[in-house]
Image (tube, rainbow, N blue to C red):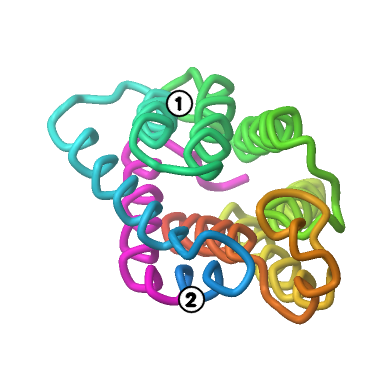
Amino acid sequence: MDTLFDSDTALTWVRAIAAAIERDADHLTQLDSAIGDADHGINMRRGFDAVLAALDGPDFGTPGEVLVKTGTTLMSTVGGAAGPLYGSAFRAAGKQLTTPDVTADRLLAGLRAGAEALQRLGVARPGDKTMIDAYLPAVDAFAKATEGGSTLAETASAAADAAEEGMHATIPMIARKGRASYLGPRSEGHQDPGATSMALVFRALAQAVRP
């Protein structure tokens, strides 16, 4: 790989996520109003506002420190299930990125650790109509592109595309986890808000590592 992922890149990624959440917060809440508690965008915006404040000032020696701080802040500020889920994923990913510069292979290990944390906490599988339906395809695409020798920018772009495809694939699903599962068949035909915010996370990563 021709590009390394460092703390500045991690900061750029998280700030890009915050900007995307700010831009699409109303849309996320609208999606959540159909099958959830109508607060996903509100909660995510509050969480990433707190993250921006927490990241403003300290010097971070590794990208992992940035992501662990992000996760810890989200866990303490985002309401509902999203805070623990996103927080655990960022913290788990960050704990894998312990050197000043990490390769795509190590970043992939971090993303996989994040997926494991999500599934362990949320007990969700592909097809349950959750953020996992965007996250796992993104990780699979990231792995395939990395193994194929793609640049980090190309790899992250492929992951973002896969996350968005996974997001759209939640529309015909019947929710089996979370608040939406209470609706049963009535959850069909609605895009999952968690998968939607997760797609924003991976698109922000693609933006952050773009040359």
Q: Which residues are magenta?
A: 1-27
Locate the C terminus and report the quarter of the image it occupies.
bottom left
Quarter location, residue 130: bottom right
Q: Which percent across, then down, holds residue 106?
A: 63, 30
Q: Quadrant of residue 67?
A: top left
Amino acid type of the residue tagged 1 in the rendering: Gly
Q: State which quarter of the image contains the N terminus.
A: top right
Residue 64 numbered tag: 1
* Of callouts 1 and 2, the N-terminal one: 2
Query: What is the distance, in whole Å, between disc 1 and disc 2 at their CAs?
Result: 33 Å
Q: Dot 1 surroundings within 10 Å: few (below 14), some, or many (20 or more)?
A: many
Q: Residue at x 18, y 26 (%)?
A: 58
Q: Name the foreground residue: 122 vs 80.
A: 80
The relative height of residue 33 versus residue 66 in the rendered view (above or below) is below
| Majority secondary structure in the magenta region | helix
On the image, numbered disc 2 is attached to which residue? 30
Q: Residue at x 74, y 72 (%)?
A: 165
Give the crowd class for mark 2: few <14, some 14-19, many >=20 residues within 10 Å: some
Instruction: Tell me where residue 78 appears, x and y as whole percent.
Output: 39, 42
Q: Would residue 4 be found to the left or right of residue 10 on screen?
A: right
Whether the magenta-drawn stretch holds residue 121 is answered as no
Residues at marks 1 and 2 touching, judged by CB atoms closer than 8 Å: no
**Mark 1, secondary structure of its residue:** helix
The amino acid marked with disc number 2 is Gln
